[in-house]
């Protein structure tokens, strides 16, 4: 028993300490979940360190840039290959995505690909049909889904730098948090009129920003499968949810996505705002990404629930 607990503690820092053969229980693994709980509690340190305009702006930027790394790269690139990029850019955004504390790109893509294979069926790892809170959080807090299902990501495990990020997935968030503290400390010395500090910056720039980022991302799994509208007939409960799309830079057009998952654009029509796609278009103009997969015209109007008079 003591050895098992020690292995779980080590898995906070090196995920290879949990073997696939131990990947069985759906019970919440409370010992390994401690860091997730502590991150939520750390947000309460705002009562100690307060706030400042610069801290709020940094928190917003920290949220947006990392949300883009998750939506555009973890999801549309690593999970669905909706566009192409260089190996250097691939690693850069895998690194940036890792700061979001949603584990490594390989682990993320493996579970998401399984979700699409069995969406809202028994083998879907986070369907709300198994319970809303399970779809939102429970699925990744249990031991069963801790290890990476490599059979779904053979194309990604050939990159040693991605495997390294997957194995030591907590290291990058720790370094990111330390950098936020260092940035705040530097501002307090160099620009005291900004009324910020190292403590304030890590609370806003990392803890609050990250917790908001995590839960908004998870809303795609939970809320976007129970609330919203359906444009297309799909074999699942996916919904288009404008609020989730706003919070996640376009991921909330989820019924669109399940209708044609390989599209780089999830807001299929002009009024469906998809900030991640706009930024990818800019990156394509700059030559950083290319071959953005479009939604074919024939697919755009296929399997409609009703013949909408599209604007």
Image (tube, rainbow, N blue to C red):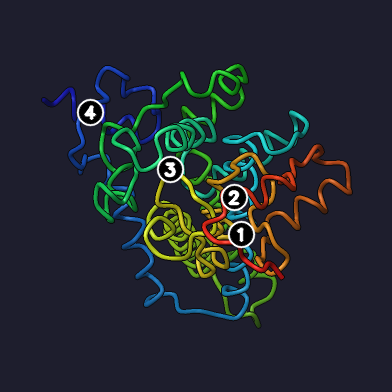
In the rendering, which numbered label is found on residue 65?
A: none
In the rendering, which numbered label is found on residue 250?
A: 1
Please state the horizontal and vertical placement of residue 261, each as a whole percent of the image: 59, 42
Tell me the SS state at disc 2.
helix
Residue marked by disc 4: 6
Tell me the SS state at disc 4.
helix
Residue marked by disc 3: 235
Task: Decide if residue 295 is on the left or right side of residue 115.
Answer: right
Q: Is residue 64 above or below residue 17?
A: below
Disc nearest the viewer among 2 and 1: 1
In the rendering, which numbered label is found on residue 71?
A: 2
Disc nearest the viewer among 3 and 1: 3
Disc nearest the viewer among 4 and 1: 1
Tell me which numbered mark, 2 or 4, is placed earlier along the sequence.
Answer: 4
Quadrant position of residue 290: top right
Tell me which numbered mark, 4 or 1, is placed earlier along the sequence.
Answer: 4
All told, the count of numbered labels is 4
Mark pair 3, 1: CA separation: 22 Å
Mark pair 2, 4: CA separation: 34 Å
Badge 3 local density, few (<14 within 10 Å), some, or many (20+)? few
Tell me which numbered mark, 3 or 4, is placed earlier along the sequence.
Answer: 4
Tell me which numbered mark, 2 or 1, is placed earlier along the sequence.
Answer: 2
In the picture, the quarter occupied by the C terminus is bottom right
Q: Residue at x 49, y 59 (%)?
A: 230
Tell me the SS state at disc 1.
loop
């Amino acid at each position: 028993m003591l050895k098992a607990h020690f292995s779980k503690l080590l898995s906070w820092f090196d995920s290879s300490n949990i073997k696939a053969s131990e990947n069985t229980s759906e019970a919440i693994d409370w010992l390994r979940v401690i860091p997730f709980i502590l991150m939520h509690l750390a947000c309460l340190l705002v009562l100690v360190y307060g706030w400042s305009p610069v801290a709020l702006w940094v928190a917003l930027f920290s949220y947006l840039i990392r949300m883009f790394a998750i939506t555009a790269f973890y999801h549309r690139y690593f999970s669905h290959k909706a566009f192409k990029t260089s190996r250097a850019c691939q690693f850069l955004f895998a690194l940036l995505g890792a700061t979001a504390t949603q584990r490594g790109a390989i682990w993320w893509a493996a579970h998401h690909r399984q979700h699409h294979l069995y969406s809202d069926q028994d083998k879907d790892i986070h369907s709300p049909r198994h319970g809303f809170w399970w779809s939102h959080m429970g699925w990744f807090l249990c031991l069963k889904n801790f290890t990476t299902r490599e059979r779904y990501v053979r194309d990604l495990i050939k990159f040693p730098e991605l495997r390294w990020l997957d194995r030591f997935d907590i290291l990058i968030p720790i370094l990111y948090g330390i950098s936020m503290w260092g940035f705040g400390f530097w501002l307090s010395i160099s620009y005291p009129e900004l009324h910020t500090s190292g403590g304030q910056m890590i609370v806003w720039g990392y803890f609050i920003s990250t917790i908001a980022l995590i839960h908004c991302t998870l809303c795609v799994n939970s809320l976007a499968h129970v609330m919203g509208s359906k444009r297309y007939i799909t074999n699942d409960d996916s919904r288009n949810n404008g609020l989730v799309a706003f919070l996640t830079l376009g991921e909330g057009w989820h019924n669109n996505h399940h209708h044609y998952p390989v599209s780089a654009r999830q807001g299929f029509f002009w009024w469906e705002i998809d900030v991640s796609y706009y930024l990818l278009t800019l990156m394509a103009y700059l030559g950083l990404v290319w071959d953005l997969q479009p939604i074919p015209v024939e697919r755009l109007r296929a399997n409609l629930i009703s013949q909408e008079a599209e604007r």
